[in-house]
Image (cartoon, helix red, strand yellow):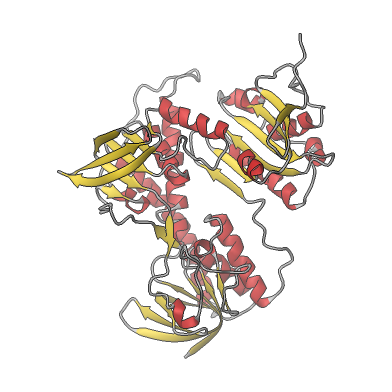
């Protein structure tokens, strides 16, 4: 029986990061992966969908005629789009394989291509692809098992007519019409992608009165308006009564909160109602690993209920993002073989929503602050006052910075909606981690012209020394205070001209 210091089950982003960190400590490491290294972070997930979004944005740009030029002809092929997506996915997969092969040749890493099952807290049985089995011993185990799209038993998902995100690449062409069940981030991203390409009539089922209900109303309403402007029909306040395949098409029935019942027929459906951890056949009960009522691992800073077994990535109940999974994978190994220099924190996680336009988020938003009854100050600035946005002709967007309601004005969170929004978040994430106030941000020298200059001007607005004055442009630039009861008051009331 082969013995290892560390065995990682799952070769997605969190598992791969754990393997690489284990090698840093000079340990004997084994990776068990039943499919392709990279997991959903590359295949049918973050990289693939974001590649589609980038192509859809580029195509949308060619159809716009407000930049001094007009594109009269542009060919569009769904198979070619999917081929380009596969090319991007393949490139990243090759990079991961190159690293694994290097460390295999050096003798530091062993790879088992097959399904891993826990026999107890130290032994793993691997069912290899050739049908054979092998048992290996691990002093420590990291479970990076990943997740898959959640299926609803009442919906006949066949990944051809009714799809999850895993089936997008199987479509032969752009569907003439598609309904998307789920108005969260993934559902809205695919609504954006298909509407950007302009070949598909998109319907989006939203059981709430607004999409992305976890975000602030101004973000949610603006994004919904942009989707509708691109032809998306949003079924607000609608619950799915039934969805079935009839004569090769999708027939779905909606129950609205106002009592209406309506039936629709489209070519395809995309079901995006969350993901579930890949716990099937993992043998968790053999090792004594406990799960919560939602099927996620019960963990304490990545350590499970079994001292030598750790859980990372989508298997935990934390945020299911590639960057979070990688952070957890590295952190777990540091806990096993050393002592992490910093605690694992989630308050400064940067996220991007690939919508129209993109949205960058870090820390608290107003909805969360009000729910927690945290008093705060807020600065809001429209994109139209940012030189880079003016140069791009992309002035539809805004910045929002949330700070503590005291003299220190420590940054609590930020939302930016607009082109290049993702370039704004890192300074804020660092400052939240440092528990820093906005004075440092206000005095940094940002590159010019750049979109991140907007967050600096928001900081200056809160300090009462901005270059662009909210007293003058009070409709687009606002600074206000919100107390613990939710009462709003202006920090700089408008001055009569």
Residue in the picture at 61% in, 66% down? 330
Residue in the picture at 42% in, 36% down? 192
Residue 66 pos. (x, y %): 48, 19
* Quadrant housing residue 93: bottom left
Residue in the picture at 55% in, 44% down? 352
Q: Is residue 329 left or right of residue 114?
A: right
Front residue (pair 163, 378): 378
Q: Is residue 463 visible?
A: yes
Q: Is residue 121 left or right of residue 484?
A: left
Give the residue at the far left of this rendering.
Answer: 247
Residue 108 pos. (x, y %): 56, 79
Front residue (pair 137, 222): 222
Give the residue at the far bottom of this rendering.
Answer: 1
Q: Is residue 241 left or right of residue 459?
A: left
Front residue (pair 239, 29): 239
Q: Is residue 174 visible?
A: no
* Quadrant housing residue 399: top right
Figure disc tally? 0
Residue 145 pos. (x, y %): 46, 68
Front residue (pair 420, 360): 360
Give the residue at the far top of this rendering.
Answer: 497
Where does the C terminus fall, quadrant-wise? top right
332 above or below 269? below
Give the residue at the far right of this rendering.
Answer: 407
């Amino acid at each position: 029986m082969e013995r290892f210091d560390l065995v990682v089950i799952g070769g997605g982003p969190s598992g791969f990061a754990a393997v690489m960190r284990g090698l840093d400590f000079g340990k004997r490491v084994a990776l068990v992966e039943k499919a392709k290294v990279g997991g959903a972070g590359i295949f049918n997930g973050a990289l693939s969908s974001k590649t589609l979004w980038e192509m859809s944005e580029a195509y949308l740009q060619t159809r716009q005629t407000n930049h001094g030029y007009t594109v009269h002809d542009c060919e569009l092929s769904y198979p070619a789009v999917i081929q380009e997506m596969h090319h991007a996915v393949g490139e990243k997969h090759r990079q991961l394989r190159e690293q694994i092969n290097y460390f295999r040749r050096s003798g530091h890493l062993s790879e088992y291509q097959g399904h891993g099952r826990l026999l107890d807290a130290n032994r793993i049985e691997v069912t290899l692809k050739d049908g054979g089995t092998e048992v290996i011993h691990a002093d420590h185990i990291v479970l990076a098992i990943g997740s898959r799209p959640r299926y609803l038993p009442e919906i006949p998902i066949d990944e051809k007519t009714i799809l999850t995100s895993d089936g997008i690449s199987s479509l032969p062409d752009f569907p003439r019409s598609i309904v998307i069940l789920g108005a969260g981030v993934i559902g809205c991203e695919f609504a954006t992608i298909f509407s950007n390409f302009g070949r598909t009539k998109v319907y989006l089922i939203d059981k709430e009165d607004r999409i992305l209900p976890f975000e602030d109303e101004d973000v949610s309403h603006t994004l919904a308006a942009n989707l509708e402007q691109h032809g998306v029909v949003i079924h607000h306040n609608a619950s799915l009564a039934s969805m079935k395949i009839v004569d090769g098409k999708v027939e779905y029935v909606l129950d609205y909160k106002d009592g209406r019942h309506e039936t629709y027929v489209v070519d395809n459906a995309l079901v995006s109602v969350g993901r579930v951890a890949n716990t099937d056949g993992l043998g968790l009960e053999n090792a004594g690993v406990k799960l919560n009522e939602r099927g996620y691992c019960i963990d304490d800073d990545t350590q499970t209920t079994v001292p030598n077994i750790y859980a990372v990535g989508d298997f935990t109940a934390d945020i299911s993002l590639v960057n979070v999974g990688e952070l957890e994978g590295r952190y777990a190994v540091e806990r096993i073989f050393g002592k992490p220099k910093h605690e694992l924190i989630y308050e400064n996680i940067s996220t991007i929503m690939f919508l129209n336009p993109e949205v960058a988020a870090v820390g608290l938003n107003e909805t969360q602050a009000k729910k927690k009854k945290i008093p705060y100050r807020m600065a809001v600035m429209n994109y139209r006052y940012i030189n880079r946005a003016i140069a791009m002709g992309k002035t539809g967007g805004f910045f929002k910075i949330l700070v503590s309601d005291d003299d220190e004005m420590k940054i609590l969170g930020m939302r930016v909606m607009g082109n290049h929004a993702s370039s704004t978040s890192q300074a804020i994430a660092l400052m939240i981690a440092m528990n820093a106030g906005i004075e440092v941000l206000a005095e940094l020298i940002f590159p010019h012209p750049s979109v991140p200059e907007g967050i600096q001007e928001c900081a200056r607005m809160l300090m009462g020394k901005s270059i662009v004055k909210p007293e003058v442009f009070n409709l687009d630039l606002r600074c206000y205070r919100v107390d613990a009861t939710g009462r709003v008051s202006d920090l700089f009331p408008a001055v009569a001209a």
